[in-house]
Image (tube, grey):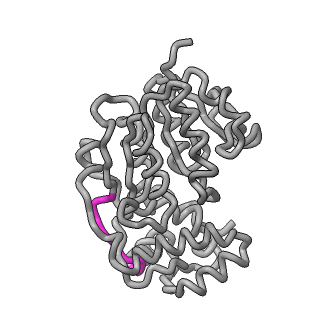
Amino acid sequence: MESNRILITGATGNVGREIVQLLREEGHQIRAAVLSAADAAVLPAGVPWARFDFTDPRTFPEAFVGVDRLFLMRPPHITDIDRDMQPALDYAAAAGVRHIVFLSLLGAEKNSFVPHAAVEKALQAGTVPVTLLRCGFFMQNLISTHRQDIVEHDEVFIPAGKGKTAFIDVRDIAAVAVKTLTEPGHAGQAYPLTGSEALDYDQVAALLTVELGRPIRYSRPSLLRFAWRFWRRGHKPGYIAVVGGIYLTTRLGMAKSITPHAQQLLGRPPRTMSEFVRDYATVWQAP
């Protein structure tokens, strides 16, 4: 069987959805990796899919048949990379995958605490050429992870202190991912991807206030207060620890650096926070 298909893990997530859409528009052969038929139901009509679970080797053959490129995203609940991801990476190599693009985290190479660092290490020790997309904080996390606080409490509830963040829109990450998956010359590269401006969360709250037409404040919660609220919402301790660790890097000033790579790869400036808030303003309106 000819191998020219791209497998997208995390296909129903923020970045994956955009990648699926862009690859379809460009006419590439794709397959969306999803956990269940229910997840597949949220994909655009006609998108080929296969059930895939990193922790279930029985799902590997159907997902990887005919695949030569892989967009790899670590599921948020997976923290033991050797146990829960390495078998899939080994299978991918044996099945003929010749290029992996991994959605990593800005600064992962310097922060062994985050699971992304362990994934990078596993990929670099493997035989399949890899491209690392080390991304800054997603703008879209404000409409997923943090939407409830904005809608219900009119607050940005993020334990980042006074730290600044060089936010990036996942639509721009997806566009870079598609280029690295479909154009030559990106294997072996690690691209640190940020937007073109660094903002603190008071500035983010001010932009939300203007666009939403109601006061939104940044409440500067402590890490402990943040962990308590998210635990009460049902999030698992491992997930809370990883998110808290990421925001700790923001507090320490490690998320504010602006890199030129997104603009260089896209051939245009990355989207600004103002553009993002304007595009998604209806998402934060109370039902």
Closer-to-camera residue (205/214): 205
Lateral position of residue 55 relative to residue 168, left or right:
right
Q: Quadrant of the N terminus?
A: top right
Picture layout, residue 205 above or below residue 140: below
Q: Give the quadrant of residue 272.
A: bottom left
Q: Who's the residue at 62% across and 56% down the image?
A: 78
Residue 121 on the magenta span: no
Camera-side residue: 151 or 16?
A: 16
Which of 174 and 205 lies nearest the eye of the viewer? Answer: 174
Return the x and y of residue 263 as percentages of the image width and height: 26, 49
Q: Check the image and report above or below for 108 versus 170.
A: below
Look at 59% across and 65% down and name the residue there.
145
Report the magenta residues as a range: 194-202
Q: Is residue 192 left or right of residue 85?
A: left
Q: Residue at x 45, y 79 (%)?
A: 160
Camera-nearest residue between 80 and 273: 80
Tell me if 153 is positioned left or right of 25 in this view. Answer: right
**Quick check: can you spot residue 225?**
yes
Determine which quarter of the picture holds residue 102. top left
